[in-house]
Image: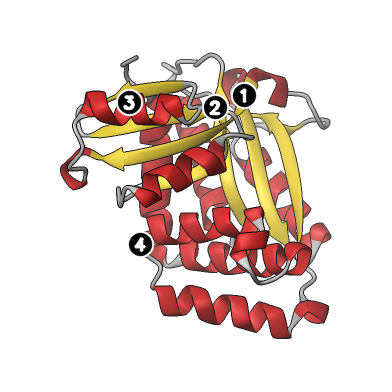
Amino acid sequence: MSGHSKFANIKHKKEKNDAAKGKIFTIIGREIAVAVKEGGPDPNNNAKLRDVIAKAKANNMPNDTIERGIKKASGDIGSVNYEYVTYEGYGPNGIAIIVDALTDNKNRTAANVRNAFSKGNGSIGAKGCVSFMFDKKGQIVIEKEACEVESDELMMAVLDEGAEDFLEEEDSYEIITSPEDFDKVRQALERKKIPLLSAEVTMIPQNWVELTDENALKSLQKTLDLLDEDDDVQNVYHNWDE
């Protein structure tokens, strides 16, 4: 169960860019607010909040910042009006793109996402037009240098907890789960005090598409850059083979 994960590399790149701009803490803060509103402030009774906290810790958000976010959300439940929206469309050469956003103004977000697609010579499609090309999976990435557990032992431990796959890369391990087993596997790793580089339920492409045309590459990068700069955008998934 080893191989090379293009998707993990894409996610690492985006999350590093987000962290450099301070965007990731804003994203997680909104997710905490929505999770508390939907399921309450106790992570023991709120699986969604547990997942957001795990994501926060994987992105080095301080514990006191997480706690402040939960307390603030608990006191402002009536004022939390963010909602999740998803857009699907095509970049140049038919590259499939999914955009997850968390917004308090759907009209603004829709206009910004549409603009990002059009400036990159792409187009937004109907719901479901590209999502069938992706699988929704739990994904946990562990940095090898930070993990004291041997790879074979780690693999057996996560498979015993219900993981679907274990991928060993040059500098990291990647664990794939079903969305339903994600929380169970992640908590098992946390009990073993294994630091997680990233941990979230995400969308993984079934197939990858190469781009060789220089203009198409520039157009796609334009779309991805504009989406990355938008504060409402939480995640961008695509099947471009970088």
Residue in front for this viewpoint, 172 or 217: 172
| C-alpha gap between disc 3 and disc 2 | 20 Å
| C-alpha gap between disc 4 and disc 1 | 29 Å
**x, y percent for residue 23:** 48, 64
| C-alpha gap between disc 3 and disc 1 | 22 Å
Of badges 4 and 2, nearer the viewer stands 2
Q: Secondary structure at mark 1?
A: strand
Of the residues shown, which amino acid type is indicated by label 3?
Met
Residue 20 numbered tag: 4
Residue 204 numbered tag: 2
Image marks 2 and 1: residues in contact by CB distance under 8 Å? yes
Report whether 238 appears left or right of 190.
Answer: right
Report whether 110 appears left or right of 25.
Answer: right
| C-alpha gap between disc 2 and disc 1 | 5 Å
- Which quarter of the rendered picture does the C terminus lie within? top left
Total labels drawn: 4
Of badges 3 and 1, nearer the viewer stands 3
Quick one: label 1, few (<14), some, or many (20+) residues within 10 Å? few
**x, y percent for residue 99:** 65, 42
Residue 155 numbered tag: 3
